[in-house]
Amino acid sequence: MVSPASLLYQEIKRLVVTVLQAYVEQHDLGTVLDAPFQMRLAELRRGREPDVLFVAKEHLDRLTQTYLDGPADVVIEIVSPESGPRDRGEKYYEYEAAGVREYWLIDPDRQHAEFYRLQQKRYKLIPPDAQGIYRSEVIPGFWLNVNWLWQRPLPRFLEVLKALKLV
């Protein structure tokens, strides 16, 4: 069986997890988890394993030793050719209905990222600004330069942490 997750997928996921985790720890905002870790939603009979999820400090009571009992505050999916229709279809609607406050879709093959923010129980697409910066509303002060994700090679972790003023 061949994994649908390419080397590029893995590298982007590692960059996002590392940078987000450092930021969240530095500012004591909650926790960052990555797959495999299940998020159980009341609306579903099964759970989901998002690529990356952020749980805000005020929702850490939802966290058990083996799963998150309820929605994460931010869910990030790194799109692979195999997962694209599911990420943009089923998961989008499930996460929206469950109350995931931000849903990020990062598509390495298309070099495209989409950021959805829950507003009045519906997702609204929030594009990065003219410089390619997306500013999270859910993770206070956190921003991501989407252009970093398309660089080859990817920027070094230390460079990104410096840009975010974490070191």
Image (cartoon, rainbow, N blue to C red):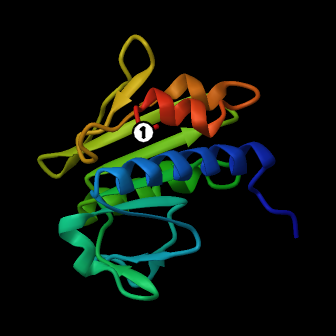
Residue at 49% across / 30% down in the picture?
Answer: 162
Q: Where is residue 7 in the image (x, y as percent from the top left)?
A: 79, 48
Q: Camera-side residue: 29 or 68?
A: 29
Residue 151, image quadrant? top right
Q: Report whether residue 42 is seen.
A: no
Q: Where is residue 93 in the image (x, y as percent from the top left)?
A: 35, 57
Q: Number of numbered discs present? A: 1
Q: Position of residue 3 (x, y in %)?
A: 80, 62
Residue at 54% across / 46% down in the picture?
Answer: 16
Q: Camera-side residue: 125 or 93?
A: 125
Q: Position of residue 54 (x, y in %)?
A: 37, 59
For the residue carrying disc 1, how many other residues have a C-alpha within 10 Å: few (<14), some (14-19), or many (20+)?
few
Q: Camera-side residue: 33 or 79?
A: 33
Residue 17, above or below 106? below
Residue at 65% across / 27% down in the picture?
Answer: 150
Residue beneath label 1, please? 166
Query: In this view, which residue lies farthest toward the bottom?
Result: 65
Q: In this view, does 106 lie to the left or right of 4?
A: left
Residue 57, above or below 25? below
Q: In this view, does 18 lie to the left or right of 100?
A: right
- Amino acid type of the residue that numbered disc 1 sits on in the rendered structure: Leu
Q: Report whether residue 140 is seen.
A: yes
Residue 54, above or below 145? below
Residue 136, above or below 33? above
Query: In this view, which residue lies farthest toward the right?
Result: 1
Residue at 70% across / 46% down in the picture?
Answer: 11
